[in-house]
Amino acid sequence: MFHLLRKNFKSIIVSVLLASLLWLLVATGNRYSYTIKVPIRIARLAPGKTLANSIPEWAVLDVEGKGRALIASYFYDIGFNLELPEVKSDRKIELEKYLNFLDVPTTFDIEVKEVIEPKSFDLKVDDLVRIKKKIQFEGDITPEDGYTLIAHQFSQDSVILEGPKMLIRSLSHVRTDSLYLSGQKTGFRETIRLREPAPGLIKMEPKVVEASFDIQRLVERIVYDVPVKVINVPADLSVESIPPFLALRIKGGEKIVAGVSLEHFRVEIDFSRTFRPDKDEYSAIIYTPNSISWTESIPGIFKLKIKRK
């Protein structure tokens, strides 16, 4: 028996394959009902218009066709490609009315019996615009003790957004992905991705930027002979600060501190807001450059010398 099987092995295999092929031809030639899932795409709207809301990604269809056509459909990108050049405003799309936009070869002989879901969906339309938006850094850079972060700067300060007018105009800026680092002692560069405000609705260019972070050693210095100015003085009075100068202990990055001079500081006493006849001592408001703070004013209290003109 085993000898006969070995002798006729090839004949048996050929017979099984032919029988299977014959069954497949018969089976795939029959018509079947089947449920398929296809993508929904908006291929075109009226010139100058764009999609302003998210639409369903997929449609579920009840179809009928020969078995071989249904098998072949798995290897073809069947989907709704909605060409809507007349659409200039919002409308409801009922998919049953757009079956002619179902991209499927006629040779497949597949018939749509029913749109199962979604039966319809809202299509919102808006003007297509291109607008620049500022980039905002998200995260926290914490230098090593004794160092300070002076500033960060992007390779470009803004990005171009293209999409629906109302949605883009509602955005004040575009944020970066969050970046958290600690223990930094020197400046560095980092490539950071930007968060897309509304993927699928808004196109953004670029999608990544390079950020540079300026980190400097924290130092102190005393600046002498900073003039004290009395402001908002009535026209009939002459008012001077006693003393007319102060020394200021400042703190900041070593390069910034080394580069400042007297004209970078402003010290003011606001006469109209602070003067009272029964008051003898006054404080000054001290303005310093960005990235510089002051820790001590010598003196901290002033008197006013008032003369009538």
Image: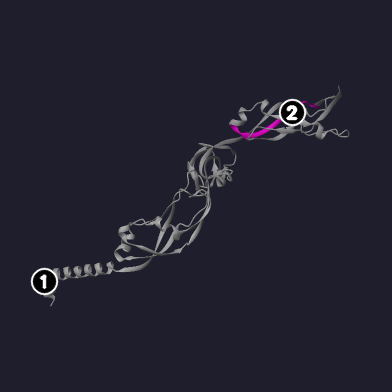
Residue extending farthest to the right is 278
Left or right: residue 258 versus residue 196 is right
* x then y, percent, for residue 35: 39, 66
Disc 1, SS: helix
Q: Examine the image and state in which quarter residue 13 appears.
A: bottom left
Residue at figure coordinates x 61%, y 28% from the top left: 258
Residue at figure coordinates x 58%, y 37% from the top left: 151
Of residues 300 and 212, the one nearer the viewer is 212
- Does 243 lie within the magenta span? yes
**Amino acid type at image mark 2:** Leu
Q: Examine the image and state in which quarter residue 301 appears.
A: top right
SS assignment for the magenta stretch, majority: strand
* x then y, percent, for residue 297: 73, 33
Q: Mark 2 points at which residue?
A: 246
* x then y, percent, for residue 197: 53, 48
Count of numbered tags? 2
Quarter of the image with the N terminus in it: bottom left
Q: Residues within 10 Å of mark 1 (few under 14, many from 20)?
A: few
Q: Name the residue under label 1.
A: 7
User: Magenta span covers which residues?
Assistant: 241-254
- Does 303 lie within the magenta span? no
Q: Which of marks 2 and 1 is nearer the N terminus?
A: 1
**Amino acid type at image mark 1:** Lys
Of residues 202 and 48, the one nearer the viewer is 48
Q: Residues within 10 Å of mark 2 (few under 14, many from 20)?
A: many
Disc 2, SS: strand
* x then y, percent, for residue 59: 44, 60
Residue at figure coordinates x 74%, y 28% from the top left: 246
Residue at figure coordinates x 27%, y 67% from the top left: 29
Instruction: Using the rendered image of the protein, determine whether residue 91 is visible from the camera's viewpoint.
Output: yes
